[in-house]
Amino acid sequence: MRFRRRNKISNTAGEMAFDTFNVLFMLSLCFVMLYPFWYVLIYSFNEGRDAALGGIWFWPRQFTVFNYRYVLGNPYISNAYFVTIARSVIGPLVHLVTTAFAAFALSKKELPFRKGIIYYFMVPMFIGGTLVSNYVVMARLGLINNFLIYVLPGAFGFFMMIVIRTFFEQLPEALEESAYIDGAGYVMIFFRITLPLSGPIVATTLFFSAVGHWLDFSTSLIYITRPRLQTLQYILYQIVIANDTAELMRQVNSGVLLDTLGGRATPITSQVLQMTTLVVVTFPLLFVYPFFQKYFIKGVLIGAVKA
């Protein structure tokens, strides 16, 4: 039995030129988007005095990890790392619990004044307080220079509540009805049935909230004056935006820091310090994102169908 080869459709010269242009254009676009991250990374691994001479484009000229030893070993940054991780864990959990509870209650059509409550929650989206009024409220609540300033103001989000509520409404009602027959109450149904079936929307909420907490610096800028409660993003703001490296380079003399472990003078400059801090603050999100991507894309698409 003979097999005949299928005739391949040959592309014309115009189609081949178009495909080649698309490939080159996409590669160029990827390079333009990824190169800034690569430049910051290689700059942070180069010795400071040598990096100040310029000419570092694709790889470190004098490789060193002392920049990271200095930044991560600095108590100012290590404490900020602890504060940032703590708020990025506690804040999303509190946000998930409060928002999911509200979404679960508002997904029940038998809830009295259901539409009125939704409209009441919607008002702050369009009418918000000023910076001064918000500061006065936080001061009256005793949240100035308090860790809870990172958790309580963002404990509830109306937009995510609508998305979660829409997701809950799409779950089969037969599951809840069978639980009612077995004597389960709303709390047990929420924790035993609704929440376990809402993995995508839970991951979406946690990820979005964690990213917001990790990237926020305005809260520390406005409400925090104690160094032990400042976050990584605020330190990055001081170093890169405000160009204030005095706190981190108080041991530096003329751009040279004594490496006590190596017994030699190791150059470190403000530019290298900026790049290293930028990597330490920003790059963790790049490694976390791929693990949550499939969950939050599915959660947003499903939860926003009828929002």
Image: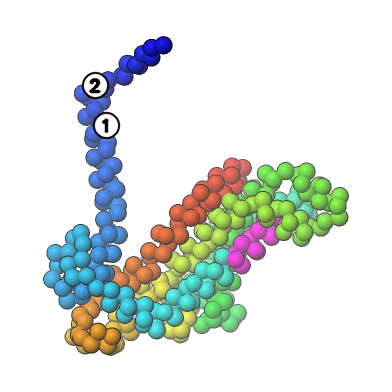
Color style of the picture: rainbow
Which residue is rendered at x = 52% and y = 72% of the image? 87
Q: Is residue 164 above or below residue 233?
A: above
* Region in magenta: 93-104
- Element at label 1: helix
Amino acid found under the numbered disc labelled 1: Asp
Q: Is residue 290 shown left or right of residue 59?
A: right
Q: Is residue 306 above or below residue 239?
A: above
Q: Main secondary structure of the magenta part?
A: helix
Residue situated furthest top in the rendering: 1
Packing grade of label 2 (10 A; few <14, some 14-19, many >=20) is few
Numbered badge on residue 12: 2
- Can you say whether 57 is above or below 33 in the image? below
Picture coordinates of residue 149, whole percent (x, y):
54, 75
Q: Secondary structure at mark 2?
A: loop
* Mark closer to the chain start, 1 or 2: 2
Expressed as whole percent of the image width and height from the top left, the position of residue 19 reads 27, 32
Is residue 70 toward the left or the right of residue 194 in the image? left
Q: Which mark identifies residue 19?
A: 1
* Residue 50 numbered mark, or none: none
The reply to whether residue 163 is visible in this rendering is: yes
Tell me how far mark 1 sits from mark 2, CA to CA.
Answer: 11 Å
- In the image, what residue occupies the spot 38% across and 14% down? 3
